[in-house]
Amino acid sequence: MSPQQKAAQEASNFVAKLNEIILFPTIALLSAVAFLTFLWGVAQYFINANNDQARAQGAKHMMWGVIGLVIMLSAFTILSLAANTFGLSDEVRCANNPTDAGCDTVFAP
């Protein structure tokens, strides 16, 4: 294995571990919090149908829940676009399987 392939494989492993341990669980956790905030707002909105202030508070929770979900979806999309923009998909694929089709020229100097 050439030094470029070894470096790409180590970088791929690091990015995969970073995504697996920190990034994606954090995005999932924050998405779950945003979704629960939205559900709490829906519950407040319907339970307090006679109280205008409570309904306004429920609507505010729903709005912030939707905003949180949009932000988390945007973060995930930006991470995916950044990886594809910088052309990391071929290097990562070839680092994981150097015998794959088209990988003979990926690490050429």
Image (cartoon, grey):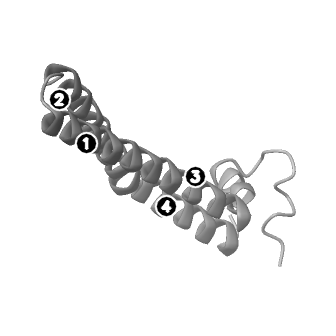
Counting residues from the N terminus, which is met first, the one under dot 3 or under dot 4? 4
- Per the image, label 1 sits on a secondary structure element best described as helix
Q: Which of 30 and 37 is in front in this view?
A: 37
Residue 70 pos. (x, y %):
46, 48
Look at label 4 and name its amino acid: Val
Q: In this view, does 75 lie to the left or right of 20?
A: right
Q: Which of marks 1 and 3 is in front?
A: 1
Side of 22 where 43 appears, left or right: left
Q: How many labels does the image show?
A: 4
Distance of mark 3 from mark 4, alpha carbons? 16 Å
Callout 2 amino acid: Gln
User: Real-space Cα distance between discs 2 and 4?
Assistant: 41 Å
Q: Classify the position of the N terminus by image quarter.
A: bottom right
Which residue in the protein does label 2 denote? 44
Q: Which of these two is toward me, 105 or 83?
A: 83
Bin the neighbour count of mark 4 within 10 Å (Cα to Cα): few under 14, some 14-19, many 20 and up: some
Nearer mark to the viewer, of 1 and 4: 1
Picture residue at 87% right of the left edge, 63% below the top: 105
Question: Which residue is labeled 4 in the image?
Answer: 15
* Residue placed under numbered mark 3 in the picture: 77
Instruction: Check residue 26 in the rendering and tell me which mark sits there, or answer none.
Output: none
- Dot 3: element: helix
Front label number (3 vs 4)? 3
